[in-house]
């Protein structure tokens, strides 16, 4: 089981992390040039003064402080609270029990007290430019903001992170980086009154401008008849939204499929129990052992 690696830096784009938290101190990202540098001087010349553990994109300085709800600290703990130290919680990538064996968490602060919002595109880009290969985002817009699509500046920052995290200015993988290009994670609930999980999940995929939504199931994909009942059931590599809506296919509920159709969001159906399946789809775009719903 993977418990995290210290070479992997995760930027927490959120409220500021409590940098003194005993369950997090061992797994904080440290910019050594700034730590051993001169206060008030941008020692590593990255455009940010004294950014030792990340940066505060509200105040435009390096003073990181927890938000009102301690949400940033909570999220950081879920990612990398130290495992096996007898206190607090264990993060999913908090290490194997040996000090310093988990991923490194970087604090990119965009929330503070109420009505304090930071420059979130700059915070996402900062992560890519300073060694993070995973950008963790657990935030959104209030309903009253009436935002129905991901703002272009955010989409551009997300695209930048995916393309350039772990790379030098020419787009080549840095020797110390564990990967070329990054992963942007949006953590959010799919609960929505009167809507199914499938429909709410489809809505979230549209909101973040995703290339596709993956429906992981017990079977390889979509069949012409129930593969559990019929031995000669045939796997269909592609079906249209209208086919998915009709017949007995029932990939998802009709509302979810209609929403995907209206927004031209492909639905990939695959087997969640087959090892390496998700990786094949996400990394290589290999759809040979799954089905896709699109026009
Ligand atoms: Ca700096
Ligand atoms: Ca400095």
Image (cartoon, rainbow, N blue to C red):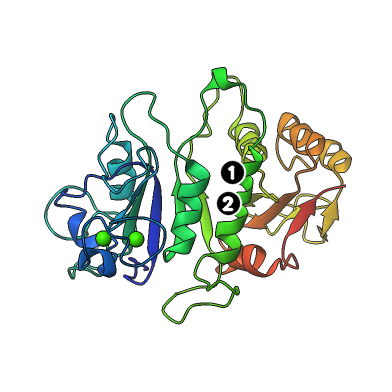
Residue 28 in view of the camera: no
Query: Does residue 21 lie above or below 102 as drawn?
Result: above
Task: Report ligand 1 position as a quadrant.
Answer: bottom left
Q: Is mark 1 within 8 Å of ligand 1?
A: no
Q: Position of residue 210 (x, y in %)?
A: 66, 47
Q: Is mark 2 within 8 Å of ligand 1?
A: no
Which disc is residue 158 wearing?
A: 2
Residue 169 is left or right of residue 80, and the answer is: right
Residue closest to the eye, 38 or 281: 38
Does residue 210 appear left or right of residue 112 in this picture? right
Q: Helix or strand or loop: what does disc 2 sit on?
A: helix
Of residues 172 and 243, the one drawn nearer to the viewer in this rendering: 172
Q: Residue furthest front?
A: 41
Mark drawn on residue 113: none
Q: CA distance from mark 2 to mark 1?
A: 6 Å
Res 105 → quadrant: bottom left
The residue indicated by pointer 1 is 154
Where is residue 130? Give x, y as percent. 42, 63
Q: Are marks 2 and 1 in contact (CB under 8 Å)?
A: yes
Please report the residue visible at 26 percent of the width from the left and 64 percent of the height from the top: 34
Can see residue 32? yes
In this picture, residue 267 sits left or right of residue 161: right
Residue at image location 49% in from the left, 48% down from the top:
122
Position of residue 32 measured from the top left corner of the image (x, y, whole percent): 26, 69
Secondary element at tag 1: helix
Which x, y percent locates residue 11? 40, 55
Choose top left, top right, bottom left or bottom right for residue 40: bottom left
């Amino acid at each position: 089981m993977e418990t995290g690696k210290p070479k992997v830096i995760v930027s927490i784009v959120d409220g500021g992390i409590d940098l003194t938290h005993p369950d997090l101190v061992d797994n904080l990202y440290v910019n050594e040039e700034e730590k051993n540098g001169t206060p008030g001087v941008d020692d590593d010349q990255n455009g940010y003064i004294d950014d030792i553990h990340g940066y505060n994109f509200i105040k435009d300085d390096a003073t990181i402080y927890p938000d009102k709800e301690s949400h940033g600290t909570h999220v950081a703990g879920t990612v990398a609270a130290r495992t096996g130290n007898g206190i607090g919680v264990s993060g999913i990538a908090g290490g194997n029990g040996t000090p310093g064996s988990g991923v490194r968490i970087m604090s990119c602060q965009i929330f503070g007290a109420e009505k304090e919002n930071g420059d979130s595109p700059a915070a996402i880009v900062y992560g890519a430019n300073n060694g993070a290969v995973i950008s963790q985002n657990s935030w959104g817009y209030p309903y009253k903001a009436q935002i129905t699509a991901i703002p272009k500046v955010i989409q551009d920052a997300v695209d930048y992170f995916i393309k350039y995290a772990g790379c030098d200015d020419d787009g080549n993988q840095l020797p110390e980086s564990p990967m070329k290009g990054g992963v942007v994670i949006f953590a959010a609930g799919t609960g929505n009154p009167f809507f199914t999980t499938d429909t709410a999940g489809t809505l979230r995929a549209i909101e973040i401008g995703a290339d596709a939504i993956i429906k992981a199931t017990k079977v390889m994909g979509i069949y012409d008849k129930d593969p559990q009942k019929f031995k000669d059931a045939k796997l269909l590599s592609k079906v249209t939204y209208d086919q998915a809506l009709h017949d007995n296919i029932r990939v998802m509920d009709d509302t979810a499929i209609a929403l995907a159709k209206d927004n031209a969001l492909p639905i990939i159906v695959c087997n969640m129990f087959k090892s390496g399946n998700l990786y094949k789809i996400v990394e290589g775009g290999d759809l040979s052992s799954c089905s896709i719903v699109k026009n």
